[in-house]
Image (spheres, rainbow, N blue to C red):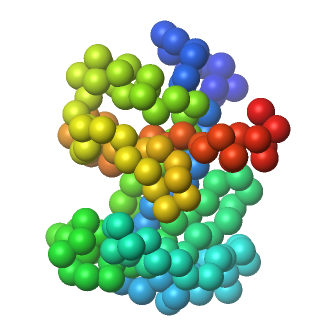
Amino acid sequence: MLRERLGKGDRDHNMPRKVDHIGVAVHDVVDAARFYRDGLGLSVSEPEINPSERIKIILVSLDHTLIELMEPLEADTVVGKFLDTRGEGLHHICLKVDDVEEIVRSVVAHGAQLVDEQPRTDLHGRKLVFVHPKSANGVLVELVQDTEKDIEKSGK
């Protein structure tokens, strides 16, 4: 019912398909994961290091969406600075798109500011870009594109 009232917007091609994950900044991923695993009964991954972002990550699985718990390995990282100024909590939302370059052209044409000028790749080789919170009502929005291997596995 709500979706029908919202409508589809002015274009259908390359719109975000789903929420890929929700990023949560925490001081300790292992401690934070206990709430999701023990309190809520959700599956959690083993800790993983993202060397380029200098963070430790634990993924929490909820149906087809992940919660990405992020712990800075050093204080001068993006997540470390976020924790220093805002404390623990919601850091970003990530939306899955079919073509990062195309969606970048669209959001920039509509006045959005990007964190990076060019898309980069994540730990798993997926292309991604961040839209600056100033352009998205105070929310850091990550847009991510699956790799060809991911697309083949999903049967698209």
Percent of width and height locating residue 8 = 57, 16
Foreground: 144 or 67?
144
Tag count in the figure?
0
Decide which of 57, 140 is in the foreground and name it: 57
Judge from the rendering whether residue 62 lies leftward or rightward of residue 30; answer left or right: right
Residue at x-position 38% and y-position 47%: 120
The correct choice, above or below, for 35 with respect to 126 in the image is below
Q: Position of residue 41 (x, y in %)?
A: 73, 78
Image quadrant where one finds the N terminus: top right
Q: Is residue 134 left or right of residue 25?
A: left
Residue 72 in which image quadrant: bottom left
**Vertical placement of 149 versus 39: above or below?**
above
- 141 is higher (above) or lower (below) than 32: above
Locate residue 90: give its quadrant.
bottom left
Q: Name, please, the residue furthest toward the right.
A: 155
Residue 139 seen in this snapshot? no
Measuring 21% from the left and 80% from the top, which residue is drawn there?
75
6 on left or right of 109: right
Q: Quadrant of the C terminus?
A: top right
Residue drawn at point x = 23 percent, y = 22 percent: 111
Q: Is residue 144 at least partly visible in the picture?
A: yes
Spot occupied by residue 114 in the image (x, y as percentages of width and height): 26, 38
Q: Residue furthest top?
A: 10
* Residue name at image x 55 percent, y 23 percent: 14
As drawn, 55 above or below 141: below
